Image (tube, helix red, strand yellow):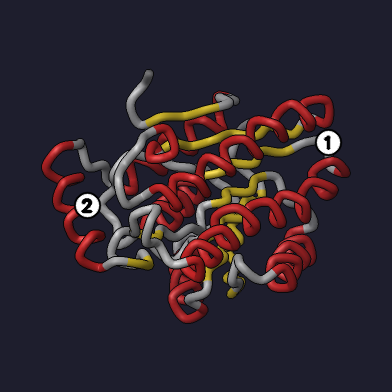
Amino acid sequence: MEIAGKVAVVTGASAGIGAATAGELARGGAKLVLAARSAETLKRMAASFTAEGHEAIAVAADMRDPAQIAAMIREAKTRFGRIDILVNNAGQAAAGLVAEVALADVRQIVELNVFGPLLAMQAVIPLMKESGGGVIVNVSSMVSKMHIPGLGAYAATKAALNLLSETARYELEASGIKVITMFPRTTATDFGKNSLGNQALRQRQRGQAHASAPVDLPEAVAQKIVEAIRQDLPEQYMERQ
C-alpha cells in the first residue's frame, strides 16, 4: 500500500512505538487519527502535526472500553470518510510468576492486549470492505515466541493476538484487507516501567533485557511497521529470522 493520502488510526499513539509510528506515517503523507488515554498529550501531538502541514486529529480512547473504541472509529470516519490503516499498538505488560500473578492484572492486560485489538478490528473491517481494502497492523512482541519467567501472562496475551492476526489474515484475504503482525524486541520506551505486577521482578527483567539483548529505538520499530505496510509483509521482525 502507498501511504500518501491514506487515513491511519494509531492506538497507543501518545508515546513510544505508537508516537514514532504516527510520525513515520505522517512523513509518508498519511492522515492521522491519534488514539490513546492521554487526551492532552494527543492534542499537543495533533497540533504539532498540523503545524507541520499534516492532517491529524486526537481521539481520547481507552482500548479496554468497547464504547470508546466504537466512538474512536466513528469519529475517524466522520472526520476523514474512510479508514485505510489501523495500527493496534496500545498494550501493557504484567510481571509475575505463573504461580503468583494476580488475576486482576491478567484480566486487565487481556482486555487491553486482546479484546482491544479484536474490537478495533471488528469496528474497522466493515469500513475497509466498503472502500475495497485496507491494512491492519497488530503489534505483538517477540516475548510471545519465548519462555521468560515472570512474563507468562503477558506472553500469553500476545500469543493470542498472534493467532487472531493469522486467522484474520486468511479470513479477510478475499476482501483486500491485509493483516500484519509486528514483533518488536526490547524497545527503548517506558513500556516496562508502566507494566503491572511485581515491581522488583519488572526491574530485574529490564536490567536483564538491556544486558543480554539489543535495544531498539521506537523510531526503528516504526520504520519497520511502515515498511511492512508498503511491502505487504504478513509478519515483520526487527531481526529477520
Q: Nearer the viewer, mark 1 or mark 2?
A: 2
Outermost residue to the left? 211
Q: Position of residue 195 (x, y in %)?
A: 36, 64
Local crowd size for mark 2, using a 10 Å CA cut-off: few (<14), some (14–19), many (≥20): some
Instruction: Look at mark 2 in the image and give the residue it sits on.
Output: 205
Query: Who is closer to the viewer here, 97 or 215?
Result: 97
Label 1 amino acid?
Gly
Q: Position of residue 102 (x, y in %)?
A: 43, 67
Lateral position of residue 224 relative to residue 161, left or right = left
Outermost residue to the top? 241
Say which element carries label 1: loop
Say which element carries label 2: helix
Instruction: Look at mark 1 in the image and give the residue it sits on.
Output: 132
Q: What residue is rendered at 69% in x and 66% in y?
A: 69
Of mark 1 and mark 2, the one earlier in the sequence is 1
Which of the 4 image quadrants contains residue 113? bottom right
Q: What residue is rendered at 55% in x and 46% in y?
A: 29
Q: What residue is rendered at 30% in x and 59% in y?
A: 192
Q: Position of residue 43 (x, y in %)?
A: 50, 76
Query: Who is closer to the viewer here, 228 or 145?
Result: 145
Which of the 4 image quadrants contains residue 131? top right
Label 2 amino acid?
Gln
Lateral position of residue 225 relative to residue 122, left or right = left
Outermost residue to the bottom? 40
Q: Is residue 192 above or below residue 43?
A: above
Which of the 4 image quadrants contains residue 31? bottom right
Q: Is residue 95 visible?
A: yes
Q: What residue is rendered at 55% in x and 64% in y?
A: 107
Lateral position of residue 177 relative to residue 202, left or right = right
